[in-house]
Image (cartoon, rainbow, N blue to C red):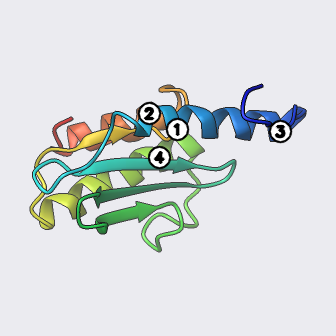
């Protein structure tokens, strides 16, 4: 690998690959005041979505599975991701955001990431 990076194994390799993809995506994706960036962060247990204006460096809206309205539900992780997508879209619209740029955070656009994005679109955010 270039730039003196160690060769990793197992989960460390996967996290490093996600980080590399995220850096590659962030070269092209940036949020403005008119179209902030909807960034999704996924862990094994939780998912977090934030609407960020990169020019000012402010978070305009956020939602996660740790919110009290979603936490403790008996739904599976994809259903929780849908709830997070709808909640972040609702909060973004309350903050005056109509359209966003989607940043999948180096994760594959499938499963929970796609469920969150679809729910945000259904709630009225434009991508």
Across and down, in percent, residue 120 comes to 28, 43
Categorize mark 4 by other alpha carbons within 10 Å: few (<14), some (14-19), many (20+). many
Q: Going by the picture, which residue comes out furthest to the bottom? A: 68
Q: Nearer the viewer, residue 103 or 78?
A: 103
Query: Taking 10 as reference, is 32 above or below it?
Result: below
In primary-sequence order, the first of circles 1 and 4 is 1
Badge 4 element: helix
Q: From mark 2 to mark 3, how far is it between C-alphas?
A: 21 Å
- Considering only order in the chain, which callout, 3 or 1, is on the residue closer to the N terminus? 3
Q: Please name the residue that numbered disc 3 is placed on.
A: 11
- Name the residue beneath numbered marker 4: 81
Residue at the disc numbered 1: 22
Q: What is the quadrant of the C terminus in the image?
A: top left
The percent position of residue 75, horizontal first and vertical second, equals 55, 49
Of tags 4 and 2, the one toward the viewer is: 2
Q: Which of marks 4 and 2 is nearer the N terminus?
A: 2
* Mark 1 vs mark 4, CA separation in Å: 20 Å
Q: Which residue has dot 2 on it?
A: 25
Whether residue 106 is visible to the viewer of this picture, yes or no, is no
Q: Considering only order in the chain, which callout, 4 or 3, is on the residue closer to the N terminus?
A: 3
At 10% from the left edge and 49% from the top edge, which residue is drawn?
98
Q: In which quarter of the image is the N terminus?
A: top right
Q: Is mark 3 on a helix, strand or loop?
A: helix
Front of the two marks 2 and 3:
2
């Amino acid at each position: 690998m270039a730039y003196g990076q160690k060769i990793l194994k197992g989960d460390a390799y996967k996290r490093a690959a996600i980080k590399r993809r995220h850096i590659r995506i962030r070269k092209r994706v940036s949020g403005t005041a008119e179209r902030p960036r909807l960034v999704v962060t996924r862990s094994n247990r939780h998912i977090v979505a934030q609407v960020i204006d990169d020019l000012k460096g402010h978070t305009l809206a956020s939602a996660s599975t740790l919110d009290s309205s979603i936490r403790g539900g008996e739904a599976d992780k994809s259903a929780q991701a849908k709830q997070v997508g709808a909640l972040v879209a609702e909060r973004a619209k309350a903050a005056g955001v109509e359209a966003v740029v989607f940043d999948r955070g180096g994760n594959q656009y499938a499963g929970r990431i796609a469920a969150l994005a679809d729910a945000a679109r259904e709630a009225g955010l434009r991508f």
